[in-house]
């Protein structure tokens, strides 16, 4: 009852005309930013941070938060319609774009919008009821536990890849190697930079994502040498009742997964989408269709993406620790306003904490009201003939890539990965495992080395700690199960071949 009373108190502040306008502004700007290739909430919040000096405290933080979680939905629009993802919408390219090729773009965008609403609602409930205590969960994870968690992510390769497991593992390894380029965190030495200064900070995830998915897809379409339009005829928006019933379980699963992973530093929307997709591909009733343009493949990752964006505020507001770059900017916004996030924030500034939590649900309503009815208008933009659309997409890709570091070299790197991504497509290799390896590889290395430093070189730390030991046990069970399944399938194929062979 106390939480419900606090939420009512929060809605009193969130539903003022001023804060409603700031929330609507943040959600709208976030959605538009998500639509543009390469741009994202990080760059936008960086540009708008100075404006917070002249905006009331609650309104400023509500606006910045709206930009962050509003961009998560905008990301999925460009990924589904053009296969041009941001870091948090990479998985949406798999089934979302496949649905576009089947003429189900409206249904895919509706699924993403409704699933984002469901996932966001679940995360807001988690944030409201458990934020004061869940923030301490992050303190329970040490380097060994994070290392084991990253290994669980690598195990998910078999679920993320749409091709063979061997090809998926190979692509994941390539991603890990790409993640090693740059300056070593521990020693400060440069690795695999070939003495090129612009590689000292490593390869940006935006460059790889836009190159391997966006530019590669454009090159593939140009190579087809045929007139085509992204959309034609009537756009189907509303799902049938059987289709809607397929959306709900995946969206709820994704919301729960995203809410859990959003709490952990290093988690967030990027990893949550892969985890939700892997769970759906394993436990969904329609798991055999996922990867070929399936509703569940869109619903689960969209819900996880949106949920993780909201619960990532828990470690920031509960213990004062930002878990990613966007949350670091939010921390700066809090400090600019003279507020120190942490355990005392709820008691010291209840109107701000509960007002921000309540505004997230208001923003959720704004997003579904703004985006679902406007799906047809979003799609009308992309009905432009490809001869005009392609140069425009490439232009925005270049602008988005350049805007991150204001460096022309990033455009060349993106173009290089566009060529590499095109070669992957020609060889029928899936780029999603590469992105998974690129994201998890550096995090795995960093936590692995920290764990060994703490244990003075002893590998037993990975099995003696309760959390890491449990995760390692689950990994071992999964690997044994996968090997046993592979052996049984091989024996089945061999027996079938022997039966089919003519008698000697």
Image (cartoon, rainbow, N blue to C red):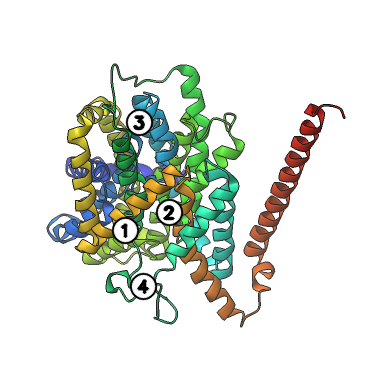
**Disc number for residue 268:** 2
User: Of tags 3 and 1, which is closer to the observer?
Assistant: 3
What residue is disc 1 on?
A: 326
Disc 2 secondary structure class: helix
Q: Residue furthest left?
A: 54
Q: Label 3, label 1: how many angstroms apart (C-alpha)?
A: 25 Å
Give the residue furthest to the right. 504
- Can see residue 180? yes
| SS type, badge 1 | helix
Q: Earlier in the sequence, mark 1 or mark 2?
A: 2
Counting residues from the N terminus, which is met first, the one under dot 2 or under dot 3?
Answer: 3
Residue under label 3: 109
Residue at (58%, 31%) from the top-left corner? 288
What residue does disc 4 label?
193
Determine whether the residue tagged by mark 4 lies in a helix, strand or loop: loop
Which of the two discs, 4 and 2, sits closer to the camera? 4
Label 3 SS? helix
- Residues under labels 2 and 3: Cα distance? 22 Å
Name the foreground residue: 128 vs 66: 66
């Amino acid at each position: 009852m106390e939480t419900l009373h606090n939420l009512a108190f929060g809605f009193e502040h969130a539903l003022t005309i001023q804060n409603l306008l700031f929330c609507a502004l943040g959600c709208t700007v976030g959605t538009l930013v998500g639509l543009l290739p390469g741009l994202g909430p990080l760059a936008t919040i960086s540009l708008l941070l100075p404006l917070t000096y002249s905006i009331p405290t609650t309104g400023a933080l509500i606006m910045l938060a709206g930009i962050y979680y509003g961009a998560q939905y905008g990301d999925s629009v460009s990924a589904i319609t053009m296969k041009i993802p941001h870091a948090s919408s990479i998985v949406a390219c798999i089934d979302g774009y496949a649905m576009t090729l089947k003429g189900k773009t409206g249904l895919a965008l509706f699924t993403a919008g409704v699933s984002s609403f469901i996932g966001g609602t679940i995360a807001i409930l988690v944030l409201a009821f458990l934020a004061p205590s869940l923030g301490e969960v992050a303190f329970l994870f040490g380097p060994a536990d994070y290392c084991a968690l990253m290994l669980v992510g690598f195990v998910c390769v078999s679920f993320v890849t749409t091709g063979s497991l061997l090809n998926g593992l190979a692509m994941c390894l390539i991603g890990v190697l790409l993640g090693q380029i740059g300056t070593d965190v521990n020693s400060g030495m440069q690795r695999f930079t070939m003495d090129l200064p612009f590689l000292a900070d490593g390869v940006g995830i935006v460059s790889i994502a836009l190159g391997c998915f966006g530019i590669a897809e454009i090159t593939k379409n140009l190579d087809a040498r045929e007139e085509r339009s992204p959309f034609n005829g009537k756009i189907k928006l509303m799902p049938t009742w059987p289709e809607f019933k397929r959306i709900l379980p995946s969206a709820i699963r994704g919301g729960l997964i995203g809410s859990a992973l959003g709490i952990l530093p290093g988690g967030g929307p990027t990893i949550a989408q892969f985890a939700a997709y892997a769970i759906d591909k394993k436990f969904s009733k329609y798991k055999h269709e996922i990867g070929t343009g399936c509703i569940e493949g869109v619903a689960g990752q969209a819900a996880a993406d949106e949920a993780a964006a909201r619960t990532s505020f828990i470690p920031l507001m509960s213990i004062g620790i930002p878990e990613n770059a966007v949350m670091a900017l939010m921390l700066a916004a809090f400090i600019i306003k003279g507020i120190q996030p942490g355990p005392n924030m709820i008691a010291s500034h209840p109107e701000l904490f509960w007002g921000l939590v309540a505004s997230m649900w208001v923003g959720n309503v704004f997003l579904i009201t703004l985006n679902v009815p406007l799906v047809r208008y979003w799609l009308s933009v992309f009905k432009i003939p490809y001869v005009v659309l392609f140069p425009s997409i490439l232009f925005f890709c270049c602008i988005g890539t350049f805007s991150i570091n204001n460096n022309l070299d990033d455009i060349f790197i993106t173009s290089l990965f566009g060529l590499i991504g095109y070669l992957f497509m020609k060889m029928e290799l899936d780029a999603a495992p590469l992105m998974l390896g690129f994201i998890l590889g550096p995090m795995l290395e960093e936590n692995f080395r920290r764990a060994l430093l703490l244990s003075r070189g002893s590998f037993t730390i990975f099995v003696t700690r309760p959390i890491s030991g449990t995760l390692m046990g689950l990994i071992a069970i999964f690997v044994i199960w996968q090997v046993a399944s592979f052996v049984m399938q091989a024996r089945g194929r061999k027996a079938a071949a022997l039966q089919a062979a003519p008698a000697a």
